[in-house]
Amino acid sequence: MTILDLPPMPADADPVILPGLLSGLGLAPRTVDPDFQASIDSGLTETFEDFCQRISKAAA
């Protein structure tokens, strides 16, 4: 299947925006789930940056 096999979109259709696309491109601020932020603040979960630092130290 190629893109040419897809049916045409109606002219009045809303654009398709993938989740996280706008924030990934820096066009919209990133939002953090308050529950996730609370688990980071209480030390139950680590951020991606903390994870990368931890495994980098273990590899060295």
Image: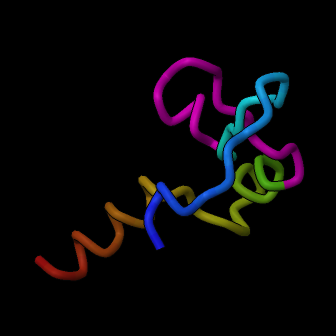
Q: Quadrant of residue 5?
A: bottom right
Q: Look at the magenta stretch and give its main secondary structure.
A: loop
Start and end of the magenta stretch?
A: 20-35
* Image height of 30 relative to 60, above or below: above
Q: Quadrant of residue 9?
A: top right
Q: Position of residue 54 (x, y in %)?
A: 35, 69
Extreme residue in the top direction: 27
**Residue in the picture at 82% in, 30% down:** 13
Extreme residue in the bottom direction: 59
Is 53 displayed left or right of 36 in the figure?
left
Q: Position of residue 46 (x, y in %)?
A: 58, 63
Q: Position of residue 45 (x, y in %)?
A: 67, 66
**Residue in the picture at 65% in, 45% down:** 18
Is 40 displayed left or right of 24 in the figure?
right
Quarter holding the C terminus is bottom left
* Image height of 5 relative to 11, above or below: below
Out of 6 and 57, give the one closest to the viewer.
6
* Image height of 53 relative to 23, above or below: below
Magenta stretch: residue 33 in it?
yes
Is 29 displayed left or right of 2 in the figure?
right
Q: Position of residue 23 (x, y in %)?
A: 58, 31
Magenta stretch: residue 48 in it?
no
Q: Quadrant of residue 14?
A: top right
**Residue in the picture at 42% in, 53% down:** 49
Colour mapping: rainbow
Extreme residue in the right direction: 35
**Residue in the picture at 23% in, 71% down:** 57
* Image height of 37 relative to 17, above or below: below
Out of 24 and 51, give the one closest to the viewer.
24
